[in-house]
Image: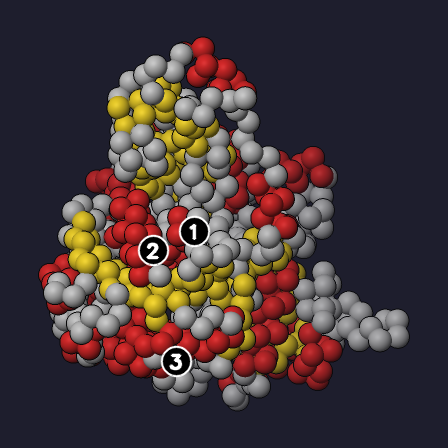
Amino acid sequence: MLNERIKPIVMPKWGLSMSEGKVTGWLKRPGSTISIGDELLEVETDKITNVVEAGETGVLRRVLGEPGTVYPVKALIAVLAEPDVPDDDIDAFISAYAVPAGEDDGEAEAGPQYHTAETPAGTIRYAKRGEGGPTVLLVHGFGGDLDNWLFTIDALAENATVYALDLPGHGQSTKQMADPSLSGLSKAVLGFLDTVGVERAHFVGHSMGGAVSMRTALDAPGRVASLSLIASAGLGEQIDHGYIQGFVGATSRRDLKPVLETLFADRGLVSRQMVDDLLKYKRLDGVDEALRALSSSLFADGRQASVLASGIADGRTPTLVVWGEEDQVIPAHHAQALANTAQVAVIPGAGHMVQMEAAGKVNALLKDHIAKAN
Amino acid sequence: MSRKISMKQAINEALDLEMRRDPTVIVMGEDIVGGTGAQGEEDAWGGVLGVTKGLYAKHGDRLMDTPLSESAYIGAAIGAAACGLRPVAELMFLDFMGVCFDQIFNQAAKFRYMFGGKAETPVVIRGMVGAGFRAAAQHSQMLTPLFTHIPGLKVVCPSNAYDAKGLLIQSIRDNDPVIFCEHKNLYGLECEVPAESYAIPFGEANVLRDGDDVTIVSYGLTVHRAMEAATALAKDGTEAEVIDLRTLSPIDWDTIIESVERTGRLVVVDEAHPRCNLATDIAAFVGQNAFGALKAGIQMVTAPHTPVPFAPSLEDLYVPSADSIAGAVRRTLSPKGARSIAA
């Protein structure tokens, strides 16, 4: 009954634990013409503040989300429609709109948001979203965890089966690492894929996770359908050693917050919850040893020990390279190491966590690359 | 894996994990095993409020029920610590400290210093503190200032299950005597706690809420009252920063000073009696080290200088309330700048 030319804009769901978000401000005025990818508004959650980008075109006919107000996920916060859609139809659409019920029930039926797998490397925590389509594996970076993909996983899962794991020593996976090297992590990732029954996947790796993905493509090319390297390690020697040392050494919020701020072009994105969550991780028994072992194996003397670009540059594995232009941890010019054989995108206004800071753009690049490579 | 558990469960889990990790960890106290109950029930009491329940079945004789003599078993725990074990002695109610205080402040707290650093005393003395439990004046006190007064003692008072587990693990691993204060009215409070072991370093306060208008510093139960007050104040546009000290010795002066330098206003909340307590200590330190930053007089919200009343209506008035904390914040914001000392 409802007019298909009226497109709702709803409170997004970022990550597995988000249930509500606060509208902090609109970046477009009512009446503006909107294209796909336009920044519409800013939303703040307890984890992060981010921009909501338009997924459809139209005129911003109604803005319903009041700045400073908290709305549940999927609540209607604006309406897009072409100019010729009558106002009465839009008002009828708004009054008939109901936040889809049973969201929580649906999740309960779908099982827990996180799973664990007993692998040869130990217990690995992972998330799995989506059904059918190509299989995608998301591999986070040094000190990160699968929640680094909170803006990525659901977007890719629209037409793929997406796995995101916590590497050994990270998140809620085992803190034991028999071999704290790229090969060791790569073997752990392959062991995980064996355990969950995945033969071949499109690897999406961020930072150290990019280097782990490249190592896997070199050692087990049959398992890697394509590579998407985001602000990846392994493409040059340079790395901000101050970041690595600061992250490993920080034991308090005061020490950790400025370190985390170097991850983003917009320092304001580092929320209290993000700092607290990372401190809680760093306090777990075994984490300090794991991070120190990894950093001395991978980043000794302030340089990256493994540069894998030449092996990947033969172009056998379809490769996408994405970087935030303002990356302070690994310089964006490393993207050029694969410029001859890979698709390279350097995104302005974003830092090392480009998949969070420019989620819409990165997700579009990833979807396009995976679709072509599949 | 993280799940919701109570502070009581978090303390039990910390003891269990450390006993599994380190064979020198032992647990002793009155009724911490508590005899056998029905068939198959090995630790009938598991401590007067059941905090240690289930540990005897897992660790057997490494849990010791002691005679009703604090001076004897606290002394034994301190001696065992000096000889290589890591005892966790439960004093039930920390109000009972009086009968064994010589062992604590003249012996345990002095060994490292008087033996030239050659002796360590890795003992934890844990027990209940605080009012609101209808347990009358001898089982309800917040005696933390007595412990912070003594050099050589570390003093911890968590406000939630996550902190309780991480701080108790740190206390057990620490090589000095630690007085671990558990607010009995927080035992049932649940929050997300990782199942794994983790240690929270001493001397790191937790900033629970950011704000630029006023700094509220507290510890233990009254942290929650301070958060309630901050939520109420936010409705009027006043943003309070709330600092949970977590450890009282050592204390995180840097976090307090940095916050006050930004907000210019300080309210210190302490469930202890008003004279020579944490509130006066912090107020004096800030007055001495950040006077130039203050826009108003420092406010202290404490229990009154009386024993804890047994009458429930009076006991409820005894512990600092969210209203009294919000009132103190408003005094720091009033043009007269909190000139009154007795509010």
Q: Which mark is residue A187?
A: 3
Q: In the displayed structure, would residue A41 be above or below residue B6?
A: above
Q: Are marks 1 and 3 on the same chain?
A: yes
| Figure check: A33 above or below B49 | above
Quarter occupied by the N terminus of chain A = top right
Q: Would you say B259 lies left or right of B77 here?
A: left
Q: Amino acid at mark 1?
A: Asn
Circle 3 or circle 2, nearest the eye: 2
* Residue at mark 1: A159
Question: Judging from the image, what secondary structure is the residue with disc 1 in?
Answer: loop
Q: Is residue B52 left or right of residue B194?
A: right
Q: Earlier in the sequence, mark 3 or mark 2?
A: 3
Question: Pointer 3 indicates a residue of which chain?
Answer: A
Total count of labels: 3
Residue name at image x 51 percent, y 75 percent: A195
Report the amino acid beneath label 3. Lys
- Within 10 angstroms of label 3, few (less than 14), some, or many (20 or more) residues? many
- Residue at the spot 57% in from the left edge and 41% down from the top edge: A103
Q: Which residue is mark 2?
A: A371
Contact between marks 1 and 3 (CB within 8 A): the answer is no
